[in-house]
Structures are given as C-alpha cells and as structure tokens.
Image (spheres, rainbow, N blue to C red):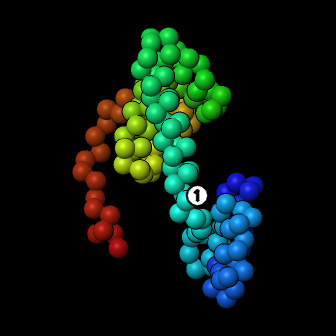
C-alpha cells in the first residue's frame, strides 16, 4: 500500500463504522488488517474509477507509443531497466519479447478491466531474469538431460 493509505483493523470498521469510513475523506484508501484472512483495501467507487481511468490512459499511451514508429520500441527498451531493473539479466531477444508481451498484455487486460494477467506476466518474466542472473541455476535448467528416468509416480499414491 502507498504511504497515503490509512491502516486500520477490520474490527475497527465493524465496531466503529461511521468513524472509520469518515477516514476516507482524509485518505483515498483504507488498508483493513484481518486476523483470519488477507488484508482488504477499502476505497470509494469514484476513487476506484479514477484509478482505473489513470491506468487505462497510461496503458493506451504506452501501447500507442510502442506502435507508432520503429524508434519507439527502442525507446521503450531503453526505459525498461529504469522501471524494472531485473530486465538487465534478460538476453536481448528476451528483453524484446518481454517488451512486446508487456504492451500486448496491458492492452488486453485494460480491455477487460482486470490487471491480474499483467501482474502474472511481470512475475513470470522476473523469475526468468532470476534464472539468467544465476549461472549455476541457468546451467542446471538449460543443460541437456538425456537420461530418461521413466514415468513419474503419481504423487497422490504416496499419501
């Protein structure tokens, strides 16, 4: 959560709902801590719509920039290490593939109003960069495994 969010216990919302909800006038979001589950974020519908509008505008501008001219993709590739420092570990072809996939996924996710696929893409590419950053791990994952150890046992049979 950002520094501008207020943080309260979920029980505070339940027990003192008017006072707790009044805090939304001072802070755009309330981070609700729960003991028995994942924390929640409470905001107004207007604020959520504003946030979605900003994300959508940024996505559309990035996509338009990436499609405009051949030089714009190079600009995007130059900017990516500032936004995602881990891309420095990606080989050049993978960096380009990441940039294209990021823009395409952002556009598709924006059309649905659901950014889960963008978050998933970022995590997957970050894990790829982690593999490239570790020579021992990269070697283990890329060496030829010619041995066939036969069919894998069903893990459900072990229980």
Picture mark count: 1
| Callout 1 secondary element | helix
Observer-nearest residue: 36 or 90?
Answer: 36
Question: Image point 27% across, 62% down: which residue?
Answer: 154
Question: Image point 67% across, 60% down: which residue?
Answer: 28
Viewed as shown, does residue 112 lie left or right of 134?
left
Observer-nearest residue: 48 or 35?
Answer: 48
Label 1 belongs to which residue?
Answer: 47
Quadrant location, the N terminus: bottom right
| Occupied quadrant, residue 38 | bottom right
Q: Residue furthest left?
A: 151
Q: Give percent across and percent down for residue 89.
A: 58, 27
The answer, for residue 54, to whether it is visible in the render is yes
Give the vertical position of 8 relative to 146 (above or below).
below
Say few, some or many: other residues with alpha carbon within 10 Å of mark 1 (under 14 / 14 to 19 / 20 or more). Answer: few
Q: Give percent across and percent down for residue 115.
A: 45, 49
Give the vertical position of 120 relative to 88 (above or below).
below
Question: Image point 35% across, 73% down: which residue?
Answer: 159
Give the vertical position of 114 relative to 107 (above or below).
below
Q: Give percent across and percent down for residue 107.
A: 40, 37
| Occupied quadrant, residue 76 | top right
Question: Image point 36% across, 48% down: which residue?
Answer: 112
Q: Give percent across and percent down for residue 68.
A: 43, 17
Give the vertical position of 5 relative to 86 (above or below).
below
Observer-nearest residue: 31 or 20?
Answer: 20
């Amino acid at each position: 959560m950002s520094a501008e969010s207020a943080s309260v216990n979920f029980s505070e919302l339940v027990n003192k709902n008017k006072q707790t909800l009044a805090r939304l006038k001072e802070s755009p979001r309330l981070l609700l801590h729960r003991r028995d589950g994942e924390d929640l974020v409470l905001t107004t519908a207007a604020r959520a719509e504003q946030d979605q509008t900003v994300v959508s505008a940024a996505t559309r501008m990035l996509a338009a920039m990436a499609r405009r001219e051949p030089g714009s993709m190079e600009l995007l590739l130059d900017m990516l290490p500032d936004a995602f420092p881990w891309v420095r570990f990606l080989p050049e072809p993978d960096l380009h593939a990441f940039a294209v996939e990021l823009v395409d996924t952002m556009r598709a996710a924006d059309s649905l109003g659901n950014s889960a696929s963008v978050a998933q893409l970022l995590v997957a590419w970050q894990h790829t960069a982690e593999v490239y950053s570790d020579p021992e791990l990269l070697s283990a994952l890329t060496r030829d495994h010619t041995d066939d150890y036969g069919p894998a046992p069903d893990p459900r049979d072990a229980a």
